[in-house]
């Protein structure tokens, strides 16, 4: 198992942590771009609801009210998510990555960019532990100011599955301790089995 640790020079891009923050920022930028598109879609739905009410029937007014109400609720939810849209990431043993945030954000093709923190797919972000990783190798917390990722912190929950994974923050320290402990246990086990064969 080999994991890169924060603070070490990483060449022209700065430290390993700087590079990881930059990579997360690129992803967050894509999520914010899509959030803006979703806001525009919600506003277009509101306008369409008002346009449909021009038909003049009572049924069209009821339809308009329902349409506009739903679109306005969606627009409001999207506005609330503006600050700190993405705050977490899960790297799963199945090689899947899930970003967790204040609202769900999907591509136009309905692929998930950000999973709403209240959704069942986000549950492992809160429930996974080193004792029960629930298929999570690394949990990453993204700290942001506005739309800018300013820091990240990793929790390595399954060191045995983290081969080549970059771990930063206290998670890197804990991963190092786990590797040291595993090495000591292996050495101790070899010593005790060797003394029994003599």
Image (cartoon, rainbow, N blue to C red):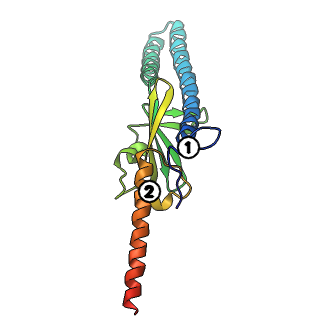
Task: From the top left corner, tell me how far across and down residue 13 is, in percent.
Answer: 62, 38
Q: Residue at x 39, y 71 (%)?
A: 185
Residue of label 1: 16
Q: Position of residue 37 (x, y in %)?
A: 58, 23
> In the drawing, does residue 198 fall left or right of residue 36?
left
Q: What is the CA distance from the residue labelled 2 to the residue labelled 1?
A: 16 Å
Q: Residue furthest bottom?
A: 198
Could you classify mark 1 by the number of other residues whose Cα lies within 10 Å: few (under 14), some (14-19), or many (20 or more)? many
Look at the image and tell me whether residue 140 can be seen.
Answer: yes
Q: Choose between 15 and 166: the one closer to the eye.
A: 15
Task: Give the quarter of the image for residue 10.
Answer: top right
Q: What residue sits right under mark 2 in the picture?
A: 176
Establish if 108 lies above or below 68: below
Direction from residue 84 to residue 43 in the image, left or right: right
Is residue 156 visible to the viewer in this orientation of the structure? Answer: no
Which quarter of the image is occupied by the C terminus? bottom left
């Amino acid at each position: 198992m080999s994991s890169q640790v924060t603070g070490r020079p990483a060449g022209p891009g700065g430290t390993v942590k700087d590079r990881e923050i930059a990579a997360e920022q690129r992803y967050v930028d894509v999520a914010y771009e899509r959030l803006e598109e979703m806001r525009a879609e919600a506003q277009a739905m509101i306008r369409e609801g008002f346009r449909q009410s021009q038909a003049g029937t009572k049924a069209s007014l009821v339809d308009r009210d329902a349409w506009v109400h739903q679109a306005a609720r969606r627009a409001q939810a999207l506005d609330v998510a503006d600050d700190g849209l993405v705050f977490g990431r899960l790297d799963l043993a199945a090689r899947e990555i899930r970003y967790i945030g204040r609202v769900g954000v999907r591509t136009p093709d309905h692929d998930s960019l950000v999973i709403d923190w209240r959704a069942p797919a986000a549950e492992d972000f809160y429930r996974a532990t080193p004792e029960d990783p629930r298929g999570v190798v690394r949990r990453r917390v993204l700290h942001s100011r506005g739309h800018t990722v300013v820091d990240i912190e990793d929790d390595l929950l399954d060191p045995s599955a983290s081969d080549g994974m970059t771990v930063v923050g206290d998670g890197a320290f804990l991963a190092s301790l786990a590797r040291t402990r595993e090495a000591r246990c292996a050495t101790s086990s070899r010593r005790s089995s060797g003394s029994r064969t003599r």
